[in-house]
Image: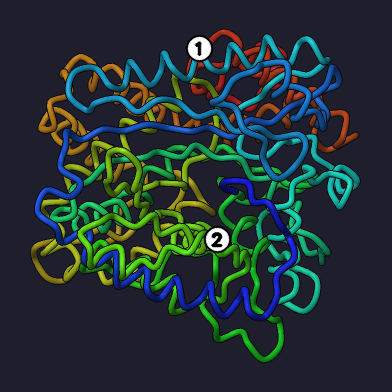
Amino acid sequence: MGEEIATESFSDEDHRRFAARCRDGVRALEQVVARPGFGDGPPSTGVEVEIGLVDADARPAPLNREVQAAAGDPDLDVELDRFNLELNTAPVMLAGRPLGAIHDNLAAGLGRVAAAAAGVGARPIAIGILPTLRRDDLGAHAMTDSPRFRALQAGLRGLRGGPFEIGIDGDEPLLLDWDDITLEGAATGLHVHLRVPPGAFASVFNAAQAAVAPVLAVSGNSPILLEHLLWAETRIALFGQAVDDRAPIGAAWLPSRASFGHGWIASPVEPFAESVALHVPILPVVGDEEEPLAVVATGGTPALDELRLHHGTVWRWNRAVVDLGDDPHLRIEMRALPAGPTVADMTANVAFLLGLTLALAPQMGWMCRSLPFEFARRNFYTASRAGLDATLLWPSQEAPSPRPFPAAELVRRLLPVARAGLTGMGVEAADADGWLNVIAERVETGVTGAVWQRRALAAVGGGTDRARALAAMTEAYLERGATGAPGHRWDLPGGAGPGTRGS
């Protein structure tokens, strides 16, 4: 949920000054990114993963501060709920063997977290939503003690004017009202960052918007929420509703603060301008007396603290990021992938998403015309709901376009495209092939993390004592995850193969 703040109480004047500073920040950013040489540098990527914590019974362990203190790791941050942490990894250059480096960095970081967690009676788990999570694990007592999180909740709840309404269809539909934002903390993901120069930003960003649906269809790992069997990637539905600041009556026409977006973009500044134009600030922390336009006028580079803070409270599944530190540049943060099942799975998902995005970027001129944005949005939510059983629309250079494909068939068609995208950026063929082969195996077995969880739950008796069965399934997930083998190779509890239902 971003960086910490020092206050959680704001005046009307704070809101006025903050909004004005954001508007000036957009105009300043337009001038900064237009400067010759801004953002130049070799392409790089990096990841961050949100981790759950469980106890000896595979139940949520609200010990993130304790684990963070025991780890003493500057790359480990607390998340919204007390049973979650976020692990950040250092960026790596795209050329060479970046995927192997991402795998090794994630494995080392998660190993450090596991060692620290063991000392306080907890275990880390990389999974989209904790299957053992119950309603009494959430609520005010579950929120990490942080001014930022309290201020976020106050701001969102104040705009909404009532409880958050959760309505998710699926095999066992879930309907409930929730008074705080801790349900959002139930969703843990893998975020991928890609550095992009300003001149290529719009095409690469649009490519990420097109690429994410087939990648998500073969990566789902969040089928269970509060003991209900729902979507293949329930995180997507949950997050959008758990932080929805729109009043349920009278303001439903407003754009959602957590969404797929509203259209193909034409410039790198457009996502920032959209955030300022469409959404009321909820963390109006006014920084020092820097005036962005005045700094730009003298040839300086403004920090744009207000604009970046506000933009960080608008949660697009693909989000533009501007870094104005020692090496100013633009990045795309791809936020849709789930955590887990293993480091190998996550690395493979990163490979597919990055490769496909890079390969599609030069083609987005015709693709944007042949795939209306509303169909890209439809693909995203269809893939989230149905996984490899989804039917996705994909652009064609011959009319009519787009055309429907079963998700599994589309993934098979796109894997060579992703490989070309990676190798075209200098990734060694062996590095690309090793991880994309994991995706190829997964799609042939049809066993995503979500599919394995459903089958494992059935194998341990999910129709009887649901809570006990979920604990047994989660324990089996942890045991198999510890081997490092990709999830599609796991057997089911009782020894049945992953391609059968088992008993």
Please give left or right for residue 63 compared with residue 215 in the image.
Answer: right
Residue type, numbered disc 1:
Ala
Instruction: Give the residue drawn at x 14%, y 58%.
Output: 35
User: Quick check: marks 1 and 2 in contact, CB under 8 Å?
Assistant: no
Please give left or right for residue 54 compared with residue 129 in the image.
Answer: right
The image position of residue 352, as x and y in percent, is 31, 35
Q: Which residue is mark 1?
A: 108
Query: Toward which corner of the image does residue 494 lie, by quadrant?
Result: top right
Please give left or right for residue 108 compared with residue 95 in the image.
Answer: right
- Sequence-wise, the earlier of marks 1 and 2 is 1
Q: Which residue is mark 2?
A: 313
Residue 397 to residue 361: above or below? below
Instruction: Give the residue drawn at x 10%, y 51%.
Output: 362
Residue 141 to residue 246: above or below? above
For disc 2, the neighbor class at 10 Å (few under 14, some 14 to 19, many from 20) is: many
**Any part of residue 381 in sight:** no
Instruction: Give the residue drawn at x 89%, y 46%.
Output: 141
Residue 200 to residue 402: above or below? above
For disc 1, the neighbor class at 10 Å (few under 14, some 14 to 19, many from 20) is: few
Q: Nearer the viewer, mark 1 or mark 2?
A: 2
